Image: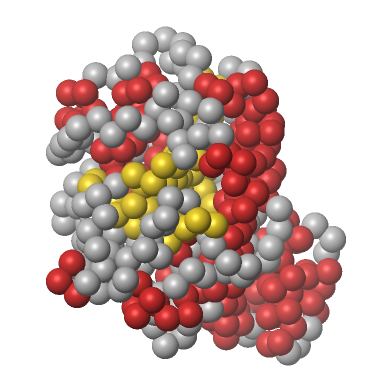
Amino acid sequence: MTLSRRAFMALGCSAAASPLLTPVALASAPFDQRLVVIILRGGMDGLGVVTPYGDPNLATLRGPQRVGGRGGHLDLDGFYAMHPAMAPLWPMWKAGQLSFVQAVSTPYRDKRSHFDGQDILEAGTQDEGGTPARDGWLNRMLQTVPGLRAETAYAIGQGEMYLLKGAAPVSNWSPEVDLSISPQGLLLADLIMHDDPMFRDALAEALELADGDGTAVSDMTGGESPQGTMNAMQRARGGKGHIKVAEFAAKRLREDSRIAAFSINGWDTHRGQTRGLERAVGRLADTLMTLRTTLKSEWKRTTVIAMTEFGRTVRSNGSDGTDHGTGGAMILAGGAVKGGRVLGDWPGLSEADLYARRDLMPTRDVRAHAAWVIRGLFGTDRTALETSIFPGLDMGDDPGLLL
């Protein structure tokens, strides 16, 4: 399907947080290790996913969102707790195949735009006037690999991962339209699209692809009330597209592919974070479990990196949510991971410790951890990592992320 730029711009910030298209990019290479990079679009709240409940300032800053979700937190080490929606991953944690890294970020600061933040994250560059490189860091890494070849192309849907954009050959496959739209996006789409046939029909086509049974489409195209539009879009939420993406990626990784990259949307939790974060974390947990199950014996050679464009404010806002922040968390999983740990230099949550008196202070560049994973998996030269793959990066000491 084709959606005009006008339709995308109508969704504004929500479009960056929850893109309609979820492409998968794959590449084969002459090595046996597997790497999966998942972009968590929308700005994941690291404090809600891996909660530093041992910090005495957290309860004051977050109030009822101190842990988040339902059913209580899962204690990890006496200081951090895992979000309860990650309960299916508890055996993975106990087996040493799951880790978290706290207080990390890209060099992006202060403007807090989804569009710019995601571009910087996927380009892997410094924030130089908001103009990132024209190719992605993962593609630049592949350009250092001799004998690289692309997988067979799957031209289903549209879009590409900036992360893998560049001169190195990769394949793109888009399984379906993903309509995991935030409550704000639903309201905005309802107001804008109801009286505009172009907007309404474009979204109706997306709903048909996402929903599959035509029910939502009939409400969108035949109903006269704005509530019909809302009901149609709400029914399209909560699909299992992320499972299909993970299954497809894992099956290709069991064959010739060695690297896969895709997105999980829905992390923009300005309002109703307790429920919104629970849904997003549940999708991530499902995705990781599906990768492990489908990869079978190849899981032991696999590393998964889940990263986001920025964290969120340490204080709750007036809508039971959090706003765009700076420092956040990343997640590592896989049989090649030295897991069962929460890594990172914790900066503290006192007023003096915060970034701009509102955000978690980043204590390390998220690119450094990605670089050490690449070096550990593929033996990539450190100079190349710090100068061409991640320009301007100081990798620092090896944090020992892999076995």
36 lies left or right of 196: left
- 96 or 183: nearer the eye? 96
Q: Quadrant of the C terminus?
A: top left
Residue 12's spot in the image, x, y percent? Answer: 44, 71
109 lies left or right of 91: left
Q: Is residue 228 above or below residue 113?
A: below
Q: Is residue 284 above or below residue 315?
A: above
- Name the quadrant containing residue 133: top left
Residue extending furthest toward the front: 78
Q: How is the image coloured?
A: secondary structure
135 lies left or right of 160: left
Residue 114's spot in the image, x, y percent? Answer: 37, 62
Q: Does residue 73 appear in this view?
A: yes
402 lies left or right of 14: left
Q: Is residue 70 above or below residue 251?
A: below
Query: What residue is at 58 percent from the left and 67 percent from the top?
Result: 72
Q: Does residue 182 appear in this view?
A: no
| Total marks placed | 0
Residue 67's spot in the image, x, y percent? Answer: 48, 69
Query: What residue is at 32 percent from the left and 17 percent from the top?
Result: 379
Residue 341's spot in the image, x, y percent? Answer: 41, 42
- 71 or 390: nearer the eye? 71
Query: What residue is at 78 percent from the left and 69 percent from the top?
Result: 217
Query: What residue is at 47 percent from the left and 58 percent from the top?
Result: 81
- 10 or 377: nearer the eye? 377
